[in-house]
Image: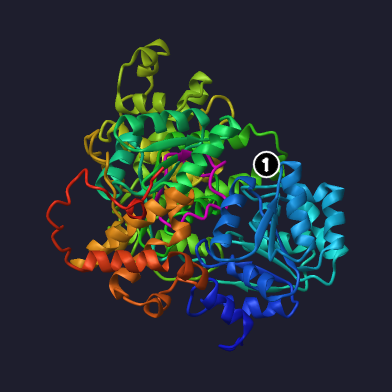
Amino acid sequence: MLTSTDPATEILRTTFGYPAFRGDQEEIIGHVIDGGDALVLMPTGGGKSLCYQIPAIARPGVGVVISPLIALMHDQVTALQTLGVRAGFLNSTQEADERRATEQAALRGELDLLYLAPERLTASSTLDLFDRLQISVFAIDEAHCISRWGHDFRPDYLRLSLLGERWPGVPRIALTATATPATRTEIVERLGLSDARQFVASFDRPNIRYRIEPKQQPLAQLLKLINEEHAGDSGIVYCLSRASTEKTAEALVKHGVNALPYHAGLPAAVRAANQSRFLREEGLVMVATIAFGMGIDKPDVRFVAHLDLPKSVEGYYQETGRAGRDGLPATAWMAYGLADVVQLRQFIETSGGDAQHRRFQGQLLDAMLGLCETAGCRRQMVLGYFAEASGPCGNCDTCLAPPEQWDGTVAAQKLFSTIIRLDRERNQRFGAGQIIDILRGHKTPKVEQWRHHELSTFGIGDELSELQWRAVVRQLLATGLLAVASDHGTLAITEKASGVLRGAEAVQLRQDTVVRAARSDRSSTKGSRKASAVAADLAGDELDLFEALREWRLEVARRESLPAYVIFHDATLAAIAQLKPSTVDELASVSGVGGKKLETYGPGVLDVVSRTLTPQAEPPAGHEFGDRVDQDDLVWVS
């Protein structure tokens, strides 16, 4: 147990500005400082970074951090430098002179932390540099990237076992926010961490509200979410394809939402510029493929939306975890429909992997579909996927409005019978649309072309609407009673369906709610800026002071070319607004105000507090626009 006079505790307070450790942080940090290896599983926003940053500062030498994203290293290092931590990075974006200067600084003992990508370890110059350095700790961030079955597999992570082999005396700490027991085992084996202590924190993110609704008009549904609940908030919208990413971003802009696209097909300069804007600006929505987000340290993302079904619960949890890193209320929202299920099932069947790979990918999708279709607590199901037991959360859509269920046995039998007749009588297979038209008795040109109106099952399902039938098909696919054939996404029944056809087994289906998307108002989000998650607990002069502090922070961030959250998080500004400090000592007591930030920004904060809370005197006579103003009174905003 670390004491109040321990160097680690002192670093936590004076450098990072936090009064106490959270959860397992204290035990992990003490273990690594003492030279022990560790595997740390901690949810996004749980404070993983401190678990290697503090040991790197406390131990002699430089801490080497393996980080998967070059684009984010600059912001990570900048944030540390703002705290007064001596940090640098080595990557391909630097000129040779910059790299040499960083290497020399490390060799002179002038760095506490050095960031680099795993790909850089293949360079002999890097290994030679490490041989000449006194290394305090090796930190492998986003360690789930080492898993071949993971959603972000990075083959260069497989080489990281050499760290323990070549420098056996240096403690190693591997960290991730998402790892099932199987992924955890693979990380240990591939990194050679069999003797490492494992620290598994709760995966629960109680501040995130999980919501999944049937996909009907996805863009209108997304606009309803943004306009009615998150106007002016920062958010991330995930799409499966590059085309839908750009199309969605354009549509959001058209309807007054400040949005940008991000996917691997964009030029590198555009991706970097868009990511930089997202990190630095408030109220920006990033529409992206899964190429975006790993390692994103923006704390005030208030919502993460999925317009397409993720391939696994692990990927879904990683992506939704980018919301609400500051611990304040956030939303994880998804629109999910039949086409998503068919597309991903077909993708698995036609993928180039072997049978084992396809089977494993199918299991991942089955778990994701189970989460979407459950009538129980979604959070409980997510946590159960990571082998964490819990009760109903009371803060997801199924807890707040439990869905109704209905006996879908007869509907399933009608659907199966139609598929069987098409196959046996006509030697034909079709997708969901044609089968639903047959069931509902619609004489479409395609139905008449194939003479499907002559089938005995034609029109036997007209009691259900098209949306209801699509929900039936979707849920039967999710439960494995239906399958997607590899030829053009046609439907086929599985062996599991035989019991239902015989009437020996019943089928319970979830009653979809009809989502009525609000009509879009193109001007509804323009110019709107708010911090509802924080401001909800503030009132009167506290709220006025909070908004004044945000305006001050924005000016400083622009002047210093920094993301606003690097200066202070919203939660820190809210705490200042509630405390209303009038002295440096009072300000220093606020969580998130470390020594360097107190020195750099303290006078400005105290000035804002004083000016906002003190009634302003009338200006002296004659002091009007055009009179001389002292240059020091001006704040230049670029």
Residue 377 at x, y percent in the picture: 39, 61
> Dot 1: within a 10 Å radius of its alpha carbon, few (fewer than 14), some, or many (20 or more) residues?
few
In this orientation, does residue 294 appear?
yes
Q: Quadrant of residue 331?
A: bottom left
**Image point (59%, 65%), residue name:** 49
What kind of residue is marked 1? Thr
Relative to 222, residue 587 above or below: below
Q: Report the side of 539 relative to 159 (left or right).
A: left
Foreground residue among 627 and 598: 627
Q: Quadrant of residue 356?
A: top right
| Residue identified by numbered label 1 | 93
**Image point (76%, 61%), residue name:** 106
Q: Report the side of 130 relative to 540 (left or right).
A: right
Foreground residue among 384 and 124: 124
Q: Which range of residues does the magenta coloring cover?
A: 287-310
Image color mode = rainbow
